[in-house]
Amino acid sequence: MCGIIGYVGDADALPIVATGLKNLEYRGYDSAGIALRDGDLTVYKSAGEIDDLAVPDASTATCGIGHTRWSTHGEPTDANAHPHTDCTGTVAVVHNGIIENYDALREELSEHTFTSETDTEVIPHLIEEYREAGATLLEAVEATIERLEGSFAFGAVAADEEGIVAARRDSPLVLGRGESANFIASDVTAFLEHTRDVVYLDDGDVVQVGTDGVSITNGGEAVERPVETVDWEAEAAEKGGYDHYMLKEIHEQPRALRQALSGRIDELGGGVDLDVSLPAEYLNSMEEVQIVACGTSYHAGLYAAKLIERHADVRASATVASEYRFEGGRDPWRTLVIAVTQSGETADTLSAIRAADRAGAHTLAVTNTLGSTVTRETDDTVYIRAGPEIGVAATKTFASQVATLTLLSVFLGRERGTMSADTAGDVLSNLRNLPGAVQQALDRTGVIEEAAEEYGDGDAFFFVGRDLGCPVALEGALKLKEISYDHAEGFPAGELKHGPLALVTERTPVLAVLTEGSRPAETLNNVKEVESRSAPVIGLSSHPPAGKFLDTALSVPDLGVLEPLVANVYLQLFAYYVADMKGRAIDKPRNLAKSVTVK
Amino acid sequence: MKAVILAAGEGRRLEPLTEVRPKPMLPVVNRPLLEHVVESVREAGIDEVVLVVGYKRERIQSHFGDGDDWGIDIEYAVQEKQLGTGHAVLQAEDRIEDTFLVLNGDRLIDASIVRRMREAPADGDTLIAITRTDDPSELGIVETEGDRVTGIEEKPPRHAITSEVINAGAYRFEPGAFDAIRDTETAGELAITATLDRLAADGEVRALRYRGTWLDVSYLWDLLSVNASLLNGSALDVPGTARLGKNAVVTDGVALDSDAWVGPSATVLSGTAIGANARIGANAVVENAVVLPDATIGSGVVLRDCVVGENARVGPNTTVEGGPADVVVEGTVHEGVGLGGVVGDNARLGGAVSVHPGTVIGNGTRVEGGAAVDGRIPSDAEVRRG
């Protein structure tokens, strides 16, 4: 996936586009480029990070587009970097997405000179064809998208025409509306410091962006799209005194959780207000809940599936989105399919939810991103309200996802009459105490930093837990491998003896979730198995067992079924400090991008 | 003009609350002291702030971010070790090019004096805000002739106090001050007042008199009195996400933060601030109290003149009867201070605990139901009914 930005206004475009790209860096960072337009078109692009892009100190151009790339078609090289141009260098395009029929188009355009291996390059050449036949840039883009198969959000400029023309299908694109300045971008964080008034574009929209206004068409018809105000702070794009976004976001968790819960809990009545339109009759006839998600969101889904089964007395499961099919044996009318995605743009999750929708199931999105594609493709949306997350390794959004899904489990339980007000009140009281408990874990950063220093050079790391501790073990291992590049694996504690135990030595630290909700007594038996093979053990527990089994004990406050979620905060910090110690690029781990919008 | 705000202080006399947060993050009226200072600076027309942080700086950084919530730019300079206020100012040096202000992050001050300092004509002098107080001990005494400062002495012994004019802790310096600080020779910590004293000896320091709010939080009970004095006369404002149970009584002079919850028939009286997501149980009576975020006050609890830490839980029918009390801080007895008690962050009090006036319960300490507690109980302790 990639990030794009465009600016048209009365100020110098270069610094605005460059800063915008910097803010989008989380979407990819293996090559970058900028095209500036002021009667002429000048393109600067190269492989490498945005900071390494050679651009002039100043330029008077007031219109420009930029791109930061995460390679899918063609290696990260100077030639493959965007913007791509037509044969004469008159048209430049930045694109996010995948053009599936680019081979066929390239053959058709064989008279054109292609300079890269990318799928994108067919777009400027198609535009060139139409412009040579007399079309304006806008008309050429409208004609071009008719020819494209696959997903795209792109912006195009032409040397001899004012402004930018942009279009989208299945890839994210938003418009920013300022005074005498308008923006296009993959994500609002690109221009949030300039304006908070945004327009979310629909599939098939083509937009002509000028200094003083924009006009949107869809299928050749003029359309109006509402202007919405984003309440995210631009500070989210800045590190506020922290060395890394990841650490900043870990420390933001108490605040993010308060926002996730704010106004949604009625502790006394055992009620939850989620502002969703799921009729009681539907919920009562529901026979199954399926959660589809990827990566960290999938782990949140695993956690939630267990809670939903318990609280709502309904069969529930979590499935990796890329593996999802609406399989037989279930009635779509009685199945609720929940998509969990931070960005709301995850391609695998979107295609899973589309499959569920086609089968006729009711769909619900749990996401962090207002106006994202998933919110438009599902029947209902619940926001996790975590605020923007920039670090590629998801931290606060995992906590907010689990908290929000726990609310949902109570909501379902109460609506279906399977959970008493009393039991619901207990869970809600734990939820209310969650921000404070997370703060308590954060206040013990020093202990985990020491543990990271002591055990960080292990050969491999194993994370174990049972029940609700299992998804947390998986998540802890994922964090560590993502940012420290160490070999880390998470599994159900009981599985240790069925194989992985063979790998355990005194050089493989084991991190064990031993809190409430993770069947600590049974897991402790597994801890003894690894202890007797001399592996160092770091235990996370609300009632620490006899110290002799643990080399480091980290205490978790009493919090019922949410204790494993607090334990996860320690695991996030462990991953962070191990990676930091090894000097890794924590916010931009190699080969990874934040929201993956390719399948 | 930039303002440098010193916020690296630990505040050991305010333990246990400062074991997990720096002193500037202690809340009055549900906002950290430092936020009140930042707001004064902004109201005075300054939009660039350098926060000098150190001890537990994550708390400050997570709260203020880059300052966008306040419409200003906030940068951070880190003071790794607490080597005095002068040393703290030096940490901001590479972020300062022009005349700049220095303020204390834990001392409330009106925007008016900040504005006067900003607007005072530049003549190369260093400026210091001065005010009067009835009890100048433990403060910086300023000697003046007209508007010239002739000397500053930090916390002189009581018998040596010659003036009631004190240093309000707000200064304006020229960039040359950094060299003056470096050239100041001191035995121990490098205090900014030592440099000011030296500059004053050369006749280069001018005083600005100030009669507005000047509130300092030195001790735990100051938190209650400063909180109450800021709330005094304010009308009750219930945020949209806060909830009041049936027959709950909440008077004017009370501040409720978002998602605060007051249970049925509970009574919350003036001088009280209830933090975000905190919960007051049914039939509880709370008066002149500072309740930090996420705290849970059980049913039927009586809390008077009390500070309850973040995420602390106070069991049903526990009684904090209120001050006055004699409280020992760092070996000194303070007699008759208005402190009913302090419950540390994450502490757990069982039901029907009796808290004697002036009791300070540490962070994470567990007190068994029915126990009677008194004096100072360390953090992470376990108190059984005896």
Image: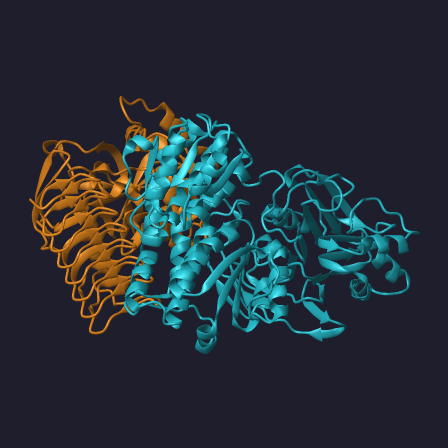
Chain colours: A cyan, B orange
Q: Which residue occupies the foreground of this view, A250 or A212?
A: A250
- Whether residue A177 appears in this view of the structure is no
> Which residue is drawn at the image coordinates 67% and 61% (left, top)?
A170
Q: Quadrant of residue A349?
A: bottom right
> Which residue is drawn at the image coordinates 33% and 60% (left, top)?
A427
Is A307 placed left or right of A500 in the picture? left
Badge count: 0
Is A455 placed left or right of A55 in the picture? left
Is A506 placed left or right of A116 in the picture? left
Q: Is residue B178 above or below residue B108?
A: above
Most extreme residue toward the right is A111
Q: Is residue A559 above or below residue A480?
A: below
- Whether residue A42 appears in this view of the structure is yes
The percent coordinates of residue A287 (x first, y second) are 48, 69
Q: Quadrant of residue A222?
A: bottom right
Q: Which residue occupies the foreground of this view, A391 or B198?
A: A391
The percent coordinates of residue B38 (x first, y second) are 37, 49
- Location of the N terminus of chain B (image quadrant): top left
Q: Which residue occupies the foreground of this view, A412 or A441?
A: A412
The percent coordinates of residue B18 (x first, y second) are 26, 41
The percent coordinates of residue B364 (x first, y second) are 23, 44
- Location of the C terminus of chain B (image quadrant): top left
> Which residue is drawn at the image coordinates 35% and 43% (left, top)?
A522
Q: Quadrant of residue A272?
A: bottom left
